[in-house]
Image: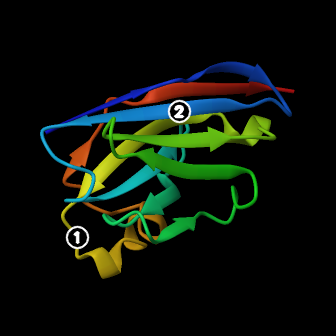
């Protein structure tokens, strides 16, 4: 199982970025997926999570209304569209996958600080300047 995150970069406040997470070794229908981020000196923060069916989605409070998670099953890829970026969004962003029961997909968001994700990508840096 591999998760390859990409799409990070440097933008000014108010700008947008689209992160991608290409999965290999499993189908998106097999695992719950999530994005979390970690800034220097701060704890992990759950950003968004999606159940293995793709039918259930949740977001962290700090990004609701600005970020959108989606997936392309044919490409086995999960995306995170980030709009209206703010300096406080600066962090390394990681995608993760988990064997958790589909009904518990939201834990990848709400318990990101300590959640033992089964698989985690390498992370992609997002820097937002004011």
- Image position of 65 (left or right of 57): right
Which residue is tagged 1?
100
Could you tell which of marks 2 and 1 lies nearer the N-terminus? Answer: 2
Q: CA distance from mark 2 to mark 1?
A: 23 Å
Q: Nearer the viewer, residue 73 or 83?
A: 73
Give the residue drawn at x 53%, y 25%: 125
Q: Give the structural element (helix, strand or loop) at label 1.
A: loop
* Depicted 97 relative to depicted 115: above or below: above
**The disc label shown at residue 19, or none:** 2
Which residue lies most toward the front here? Answer: 74
Label 2 crowding class (10 Å Cα cut-off): few <14, some 14-19, many 20+?
A: many
55 vs 128, nearest the viewer:
55
Quadrant hosting residue 4: top left
Q: Within the image, what quadrant is residue 114 found in?
A: bottom left
Would residue 28 be found to the left or right of residue 88 on screen?
Answer: left
Disc 2, SS: strand
Give the farthest residue toward the bottom: 103
Q: Nearer the viewer, residue 84 or 71?
A: 71
Q: Nearer the viewer, residue 54 or 105?
A: 54
């Amino acid at each position: 199982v591999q998760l390859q995150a990409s799409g990070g970069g440097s933008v000014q406040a108010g700008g947008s970025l689209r992160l991608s997470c290409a999965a290999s070794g499993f189908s998106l229908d097999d695992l719950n997926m999530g994005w979390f981020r970690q800034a220097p000196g701060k704890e992990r923060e759950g950003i968004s999570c999606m159940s293995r069916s793709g039918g259930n989605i949740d977001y962290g409070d700090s990004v609701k209304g600005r970020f959108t998670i989606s997936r392309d099953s044919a490409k086995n890829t999960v995306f995170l569209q980030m709009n209206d970026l703010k300096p406080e969004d600066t962090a390394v962003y990681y995608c993760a996958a988990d064997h958790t029961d589909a009904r518990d997909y939201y834990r990848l968001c709400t318990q990101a600080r300590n959640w033992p994700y089964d698989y985690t990508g390498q992370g992609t840096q997002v820097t937002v300047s004011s």
